[in-house]
Amino acid sequence: MASLEQTKAKLTKDLEAATQKATGAASAAETLKAQLEAMQKEKHDVLVAECLRARAEAGIAGKENEEKEKLAKLSDETLALLKADAQKVASVNQTREPAAPKLRYSKTNEEPLAASMKEMRAQLGLPEHKPKEEA
């Protein structure tokens, strides 16, 4: 019986030690999990801010608070795609010439009607019109 009592006491001590180790490991795991979640949230927030800035530069962003709320709901992969697309749009917008109204007739010394007639005759393959001189 005494050996059974000793074995029971030893097993009880081992169980208590294992329980303490498990409790310590669980608290360490919770701490690490909280740190990981904080890092992921910070990374996501940075990506949301970068995407918002890129969309604003491209001229496709709406109201900042509404955009931020919409973007915060998206995954990191989607935000990365949106950011890349917004940067492409911004680069295209920067390289594109500003839209100016097209002039039907360019500025010349000729009157618009005469210039138009000359251009039309050239397109049709007709010889240039020479006005008759009065004597």
Image (tube, rainbow, N blue to C red):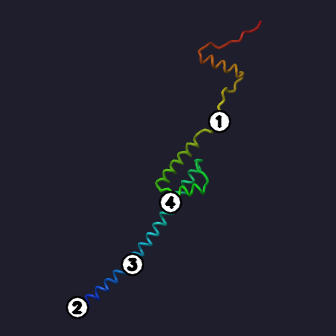
Residue type, numbered disc 4: His
Q: Outermost residue toward the bottom? A: 2
Instruction: Looking at this view, name the residue that lies furthest to the right.
Output: 135
Q: Earlier in the sequence, mark 1 or mark 4?
A: 4
Inspect the image, locate mark 1, and give the three-letter code of the amino acid beneath it. Answer: Ala
Nearest to N terminus: mark 2 or mark 1 = 2
Residue 127 image position (x, y, % from top left): 62, 12
Q: Residues within 10 Å of mark 1 (few under 14, many from 20)?
A: few
Residue 109: % across, % down = 72, 23
Q: Secondary structure at mark 4?
A: helix
Read off the residue under disc 2. Answer: 3
Crowding near the residue tagged with mark 2, few <14, some 14–19, many ≥20 C-alpha atoms within 10 Å = few
* C-beta proximity under 8 Å, tags 2 and 3: no
First-in-chain label (3 vs 1) = 3
Whole-percent x, y for residue 105 in the image = 67, 26
Real-space CA distance between mark 2 and mark 3, rounded to the nearest whole angstrom: 30 Å
Q: Which circle's residue, 4 or 2, is located before the other in the chain?
A: 2
Q: How far apart are labels 3 and 1 at the CA level?
A: 72 Å
The residue at 45%/72% (across/down) is: 31
For disc 3, the marked residue is 23
Q: Identify residue for label 1.
A: 100
